Amino acid sequence: MSTGTSTSTSSGTATRSAPRRAWWLRRDLLVWLMLPLLAVVAATGAVGTFTAQRLTDKAFDRWLLDTARSVAAQVRIRDGKSSLDLPAATEAVLGYDEIDQVYFSVNEAGRLLAGQPGIPQSGTRESSYRAGLAYDAFYAGHAVRVAAATVSGASDGEVLVLVAETTRKRQRAQGEVLMMLLPVGGLLLAAAAAIGFAVRRTLDPLEAIAARWNERSHASLQPIAADDMPRELMPFATALNDLLARIRAMLAREQQFAATVAHQLRTPLAGLQLGVTRAAEAGTLAGSREVLGELGHTVQRTARLVQQLLALGRLDPEVRGSLAFVPTDIAALAHDVGSTFLEFAAARSVTLELDAPAQALVVPLQPELFSEALGNLLDNALRYTPPGGQVLIGFDAAPPAIRVSDTGPGVPDELRDTVFERFVRGQHADGQGSNQGSGLGLAIVRDIVALHGATVALSRSASGGACVTIRFSAEGVVSG
């Protein structure tokens, strides 16, 4: 057999992310629903305040500007000079107000024609109207709103009329406007209460369903009825029932595997016990040695059976995702596995050959499992090939494949599908059934091959014996 193989192993460390702290769905729902509501409340308050101030400003500013324009209309030009003669009653009317204090002044080029001096001619929060300007200022120890209007004076100059009023009426009017928004605030509070109630009503059934599922899952692994739950929870219920189904299937496989192990080990253990009894009762040393030789063969068969049962247990679908596949030269792997069977082949007077290809055939494998599958094929071929026969390991390149063929009796056409089932045994060259095998070898090969995304087929070899071919998909080839 040719020598040489190339295998590579890879290892990695998995990093665990920090576990997420437990969180409350009720709290998150309330937060995410209340935050927009609070934003609406804040926006409503801001808009209401701005609107109230804007409305009152417009109404009162226009009244002040009308007053200023009325005073400006009384300006007269006499002998090239501007003058204003207001009767005392008129000035009293201008300054009278039950709530606020009103001040006015008429100025031309810095000269006070009438009214109170020192009224500011500029201020903050200025608003421009067709009749003039209005702005906030501070006068005589009070916050005032000033209206400014101009009229043509003498010598192409301008006469500035200022009317200032304290802001008590404005503030009262703004408060009354804001009071009109109280129903809106009540509606917002009602909406908040409705949100809290809706969240509670929505989550209470979920808690009840969870409690029912928790109680049911402790008593039975049967599917849980999902007819009375919201549609949004149907995917969760389906996933939970799928998990329960997987658990039931896993328990069933474990029970079947335990029964299989008990059944398969019963016969060899009984044989070992009988052999020990025979060895103890043997009257001569030669008789004891003969019995011990039979016990050695029984121990070998039992060890092989245990190895196959362990391999069968590793093929559980639940653990397949954790297997690591590495690029492996199947010819080199076949050489290593075949080397372990040379002594067994020589003991049976069977020739074991390897027809290695010129180039490496690298495919992703789980080396230990595939070695187990290839070992099962070689063990079967050597056991069913008569002395003087031949077992050949061959290969195909495109797509990659490995063949194990022998010169034994072959497998009848009607049994070629069933021999891959568990506990189905073939026949020796004499046509008698095999009692030395467990009937698990080809079943294990089938499962391992399927795990690798490959196919296995049984055909007749060129010599009339059996030929088992494992063929990989072209997509799985790793370029060397």
Image (spheres, helix red, strand yellow):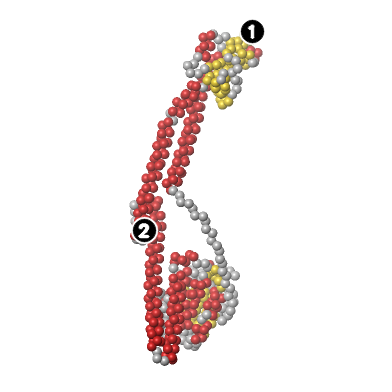
Q: Is residue 335 visible?
A: yes
Q: In the image, which is nearer the foreground, mark 1 or mark 2?
A: 2
| SS type, badge 2 | helix
What amino acid does circle 1 point to? Asp
**131 versus 77 height, above or below:** below
**Mark earlier in primary sequence (1, 2):** 1
**200 versus 58 height, above or below:** below
Q: Is residue 309 left or right of residue 343?
A: left
What amino acid does circle 2 point to? Ser
In the displayed orientation, state which residue is furthest to the top: 79
Could you say where residue 180 lies in the image, as x and y percent from the top left? Answer: 43, 28
Q: Quadrant of residue 237?
A: bottom left
Could you say where residue 115 lies in the image, as x and y percent from the top left? Answer: 57, 13
- Give the camera-side residue of 243 and 451: 243
Quadrant of the rendering where the N terminus is positioned:
bottom right
- Give the camera-side residue of 466 and 106: 106
Q: Residue at x 51, y 70 (%)?
A: 366
- Which residue is denoted by mark 1 in the rendering? 79
| SS type, badge 1 | loop
Could you say where residue 344 lies in the image, as x and y percent from the top left? Answer: 50, 83
Q: Residue at x 44, y 86 (%)?
A: 292
Q: How many numbered marks, from 0 up?
A: 2
- Which residue is denoted by mark 2 in the rendering? 217
Q: CA distance from mark 1 to mark 2?
A: 109 Å
Q: Quadrant of residue 254?
A: bottom left
